[in-house]
């Protein structure tokens, strides 16, 4: 439920509403806006009888929200959230942010080389996986904590913030020590205990869409993080599983404009995992930008043919630099169209 206050409602009136909601055994979350304050009501199991609230001075409207997500919805928070990753801003009104780097951290040297290449081409955030959710147990599982050290050192050396996946609650402390942004992978999108723990941290979060998650489930997963107090969440469409085998996944680009309308959280696209094929990555990156993303995540490896993970979908440094050049031109063109 959302309680919308009159624009002239006083602090005392807002507090009285909050107290009334809490006396009903529910949680009240005031959401100040530029025009008026709204109060989000949380923790209700079903419909809330609202007559006691509707009557209170300063209350303009009571909206019943039956969706499983509220805090992440635009209804609750019309202004777009801008996520700050160690100074790199992602969200409405910002330039598209490029996160790039290898699928997995393999060696210290590989990570340093990749960092220099990402930086030189104009990338904004360095990626690399230390804990890898591989489909089979015999594949490379990542370097773990040693990899985190290589990643953070490489990022520091070139002045780029770093993002890396955390797979389990027990890894959170160490990942927070080394990373500027926490990635929740597609396979963990509905690991609700992990989402809640990440929600208790102050690190920004990159939440990837589960491979068979509906849009509603995706937003409800983000809600778990925001409900714990961390609203610094970036959503990432990385392809969903369909009957189509020609690509690794099916890039569901239409969720980009949908999410922009439904949620205030930034949305980015990962064309690497969505397609699984290097030649398709730049094309779908272009398409994502036109669809309105706030950023992109692509895999780039200094020598993709030697990659221990996801080489077939990784751009080489030249391909990445070419893509970066194209993207800035597309952004300039889109800005002109919108002006
Ligand atoms: C990754 O980014 O390396 C990854 C494993 O992605 P996803 O969770 O989308 O499969
Ligand atoms: Mn990968």
Image (cartoon, grey):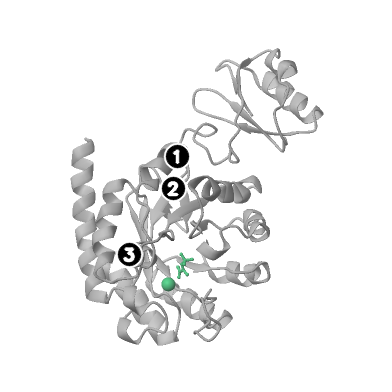
- Disc 1, SS: loop
**Which residue: 18% across, 46% down?**
333
Q: Mark 2–mark 1 contact, CB under 8 Å?
A: yes
Name the residue located 39 percent from the left edge and 63 percent from the top edge.
249
* Residue that appears at 27% across and 76% down: 316
Q: Is residue 72 above or below residue 96?
A: above
Q: Position of residue 304 (x, y in %)?
A: 32, 81
Whether residue 230 is visible to the viewer of this picture, yes or no, is: no
Q: Nearer the viewer, residue 220 or 151?
A: 220
Q: Name the foreground residue: 302 vs 255.
A: 255
Question: In the rendering, at what x and y percent does residue 281 appear?
Answer: 28, 65
* Whether residue 235 can be seen here: yes
Q: Quadrant of ligand 2?
A: bottom left
Tag of residue 123: 3
Residue 211 rendering spot, x and y as whole percentages: 48, 60
Question: Considering the numbered disc 2 on the image, is that residue within a helix, a strand or a loop?
Answer: loop
What residue would you read off at disc 2? 266
Q: Please tell me in which quadrant of the rendered image residue 100 appears.
A: bottom left
């Amino acid at each position: 439920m959302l309680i919308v206050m009159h624009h002239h409602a006083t602090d005392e009136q807002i507090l009285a509403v909050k107290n009334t909601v809490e006396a009903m055994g529910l949680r009240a979350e005031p959401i100040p806006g530029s025009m008026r304050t709204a109060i989000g009501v949380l923790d209700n199991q079903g419909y809330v009888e609202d007559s006691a609230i509707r009557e209170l001075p300063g209350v303009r409207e009571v909206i019943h929200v039956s969706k499983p997500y509220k805090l992440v919805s635009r209804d609750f928070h019309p202004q777009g959230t801008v996520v700050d990753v160690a100074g790199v801003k992602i969200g409405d009104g910002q330039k598209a942010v490029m996160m790039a780097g290898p699928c997995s951290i393999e060696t210290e040297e590989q990570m340093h080389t990749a960092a220099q290449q990402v930086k030189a081409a104009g990338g904004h955030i360095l990626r690399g996986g230390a804990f890898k959710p591989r489909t089979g147990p015999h594949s490379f599982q990542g370097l773990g904590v040693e990899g985190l050290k290589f990643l953070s050192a490489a990022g520091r050396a070139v002045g780029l913030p770093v993002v890396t996946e955390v797979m389990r609650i027990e890894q959170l402390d160490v990942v927070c020590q080394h990373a500027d942004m926490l990635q929740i992978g597609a396979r963990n999108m509905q690991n609700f205990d992990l989402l809640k723990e990440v929600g208790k941290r102050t690190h920004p979060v990159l939440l990837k869409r589960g491979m068979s998650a509906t849009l509603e489930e995706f937003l409800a997963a983000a809600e778990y993080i925001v409900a714990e107090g961390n609203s610094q969440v970036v959503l990432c469409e990385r392809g969903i599983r369909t009957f189509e085998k020609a690509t690794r996944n099916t890039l569901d680009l239409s969720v980009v404009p949908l999410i922009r309308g439904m949620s205030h959280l930034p949305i980015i696209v990962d064309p690497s995992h969505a397609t699984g094929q290097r030649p398709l990555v730049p094309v779908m990156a272009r398409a994502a930008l036109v669809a309105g993303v706030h950023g992109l995540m692509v895999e780039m490896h200094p020598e993709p043919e030697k990659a221990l993970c996801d080489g077939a979908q990784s751009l080489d440094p030249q391909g990445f630099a070419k893509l970066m050049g194209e993207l800035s031109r597309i952004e300039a063109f889109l800005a002109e169209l919108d002006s």
